[in-house]
Amino acid sequence: MKELIIIGGGPSAMSAGIYAARRKLDLKIISKDFGGYVKETEKIENYLGFNSISGLELAKKFEDHLRSYDLDILEDAEVKKVYEKDSIVMIELENGKSFKSKTAIIAAGSKRRKLDVPGEKEFLNKGVTYCAICDGPIFQDQEVAVIGGGYSGTQSALYLSKIAKKVYLLELEENLRGEKIVIDKLKENKNIEIITKSKVTEIIGKNSVEGLRYLDLKNNKEKQLKVSGISIEIGMIPNSYIADVKKNKEGYIQVDENMKTSNNRIFAVGDINDKGPEQIAVAVGQGCIAALEAEKTILSK
Amino acid sequence: MKKKIKIYTTPICPECERVKKLLRDKKIDFEEIDIFGNKEKAEEMINKSGQKRVPVTEIGEEVIVGFNKKSIEEAL
């Protein structure tokens, strides 16, 4: 039996791993891969110590740092279930394997929220993408739309504006919600058109995406855009179904200030919990708290 | 006989990195085609896979979209 098992490979998991390794806890890390959504970010300019760094590069630095410790890491693994039985945390994998531990930190992150309109499923990978940064270069010199004007949508629109002929940025609310510094750049950009108060109702096309329909909420009129690529960035859904602990209405795992869930042997950090904005700095801090708190639980009889 | 391997990638693409790492770990040579700024190659990739998604890995006759460890290992 391990003392601590960390589930996940994003910044919160890696930070927890480093703190736990330095405390010499008997530790195992289980993850699909390392880096999380950091790797799908073009540039990171708000993390201390780096004026501007690509997400891939920063993720690589995090991973190298983690792997500089001699750790028991299980990669390419999907966790199916985490629960406690007789003061032991049980972790079951999709492949049938299972592990026991005194404590667990769940850092399994979130997945992209679906728009849930006709055409979205049909045209997935035929013009519809959930990774603008990855698939963006396919739409070179074409017209594209980004749906969602939050933190990641505004960043994607800026990235795509360097590749595509024109970028439409559609936001349901009255204002964009990303960082002001990014929004200002978007507004200066001539090939970006921001359409707020717009509700996308359908993605249309034949063999691949040819456009979308949306409801203009300013005058309740249906309108159409001709685009060949659509990036959907309307937020995330936490991967919390694996954990048998209390969650809020949106599915985020409820934790206290020590990152402890409703089960005192299970902690949750990063995008999966109900605390703090979904930022690298927050994830790193939460990983630290959880690892140190898990140690206290391990040491207490 | 050694199969010829081509991977179509973009500069920021976690799944592309995973495909490349998998092959490198197995010490298998491959040709990487970065489609950024290369419309002709992008078009070639879309024609091969029928999809607008990276990475596309071509192993001999087989075409694999995305990172799929099992499919790649079977095709090798």
Image (cartoon, rainbow, N blue to C red):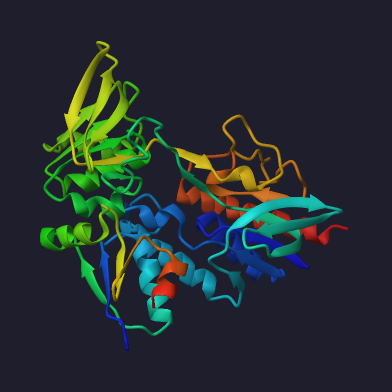
Quarter holding the N terminus of chain B?
bottom left
Q: Quadrant of residue A297?
A: bottom right
Residue at position x 32%, y 21% from top? A174
Residue A173 lies in quadrant: top left
Task: Say which of B20 and A206 sits in front.
Answer: A206
A280 or A96: which is nearer to us? A96
Circle count: 0
Q: Is residue A257 left or right of residue A161?
A: right
Determine which quarter of the picture holds residue B34: bottom left
Identity of the residue drawn at 71% across and 54% down: A293
Residue A54 showing in the rendered view? yes
The C terminus of chain B: image quadrant: bottom left
x 16%, y 50%: residue: A163
Examine the rendering and report whether any part of residue A265 can be seen.
no
Question: Does residue B60 sit above or below A148 in this rendering?
Answer: below
Determine the residue positioned at 48% across, 50% down. Answer: A281
- Spot occupied by residue A96 in the image (x, y as percentages of width and height): 67, 62
Compared to A35, does A46 lie above or below? above
State left or right for residue A273 relative to residue A141: right
Q: Name the spot of residue A105 as percent of width and height, x first.
A: 66, 55
Question: What x and y, as percent, mark residue A74?
Answer: 59, 69
Q: Compare residues A119 and A137 and report the one nearer the observer.
A: A119
Q: On the rendered structure, is B70 left or right of A259?
A: left
